[in-house]
Image (cartoon, rainbow, N blue to C red):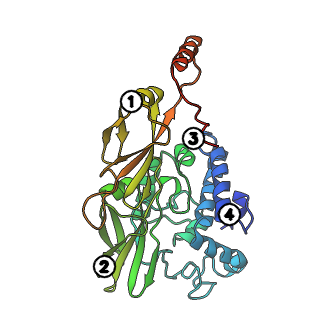
Amino acid sequence: MEYQDYYQTLGVPRTASQAEIKKAFRKLAREVHPDVKPGDKTAERRFKDINEANEVLSDPDKRAKYDTLGANWERYSTAGAGTAGDPFGPGGPFAGFGGGGGTRSGTGGNVRYEFRTADAGGFSDFFRMFFTGGDAGQPQDAATRNAGARRRAAAGSAGPSFEELLGEMSFDGSDAGLGSSAGSSRARGSVEAEAEISLEEAFHGTKRLVEVDGKRLEVNIPPGVDSGSRIRIAGRGGGGRDLFVVTRVKPHAVFTRHGADLHRELVISLREALLGGEVPVSTLRGKVLLTIPTGSQTGRVFRLKGQGMPRLKGDGAGDLYAKVRVAIPTKLSPQAEEAAKAFLDLVDQPDPRATTP
């Protein structure tokens, strides 16, 4: 089994920051994505390599284990591969991955999400051995295979789509829309798992499947949760412990959130700004009509009462604040320019800089 130098694959030093790793991955992924170079087997292999490297280096826990492995690879390759026992010793970062009769466990303890997790199906034997708890070259269990198949079918390829790469793409928990595997921790007799959800899911409420000690548990995530909200399921964390599901809401392309209030930009035409009118505004509830008064300026903010997020504790909902931006026509025809000059000559507009330094 060949050692994979993930830092070399991404072209970053071992001291690279998370931001530098993300930047390098995005650049390389755009260059060799299968959607950009269809049918190019070399590019496809390269894309899988950088995808695998980023999967490890962008995850602090995986990266720490990988860095430990780098210094001990020769010892593992001679003492551990294909033999019983763990060359790193009991309780080490790779306990149970020595092959033979060792006990295998995932990095998330006994709590994991059943879906939307990173899939190792397209990754190397090296990755599967050390980061999924499976034997190199051996088939994965049905749950892992099915989760990977669903992800690949949804993406239409062995990795994230090119549109996802150009959009909100990062493998630090929200990579290419794939979500993150459930991280878990144990503190004060409880178990924690993280659920990454969209703003729409936070608005309407959603569900997640969690597996605890081999048993599947469907968790209801109520409307109104925010990043850091904790959902307690008493006594379901295994061994009589409580399970806490901590939510993380992904950034949205249109709306920004401040508590229960939402903010967005609203682009209006020059005609609507000058003469007023009714314009449709998309909210998380649906579209509403907003009356724009005559003479509305760029930067004016309109409050749409009750169109924000539902309140997690208490009744009602927050408000939506729409900030206007006037779109000025460009590439005017000669006739339009003459008409605009005639119109502006009729308008007695004071110098807007007279009262502004």
Of marks 1 and 3, which one's residue comes earlier in the chain?
Answer: 3
Judging by the rendered image, the residue that carries numbered circle 1 is: 276
Estimate how packed mark 1 is, as few (under 14), some (14 to 19) or many (20 or more) residues with alpha carbons within 10 Å.
Answer: some
Q: Is residue 76 above or below residue 217?
A: below
Q: Are marks 4 and 2 in contact (CB under 8 Å)?
A: no
Estimate how packed mark 2 is, as few (under 14), some (14 to 19) or many (20 or more) residues with alpha carbons within 10 Å.
Answer: some
Q: Give the residue type that dot 4 points to.
A: Tyr
Q: Nearer the viewer, mark 1 or mark 2?
A: 1
In the picture, measured across the screen, residue 225 lies left or right of residue 38, that is: left
Q: Are marks 1 and 3 in contact (CB under 8 Å)?
A: no
Query: Regarding mark 4 in the picture, which secondary structure is present there?
Result: helix
Q: Give the residue type that dot 2 points to.
A: Arg
Residue sitting at 40 percent across and 31 percent down? 294
For the C terminus, give its image quadrant.
top right
Q: Give the residue type that dot 3 points to.
A: Asp
* Residue 275: quarter of image: top left
Question: Number of numbered discs present?
Answer: 4
CA separation in Å, label 2 and label 3:
43 Å
Of marks 2 and 3, which one's residue comes earlier in the chain?
Answer: 3
* Residue 56: quarter of image: bottom right
Q: Give the residue type that dot 1 points to.
A: Gly
Judging by the rendered image, the residue that carries numbered circle 2 is: 236
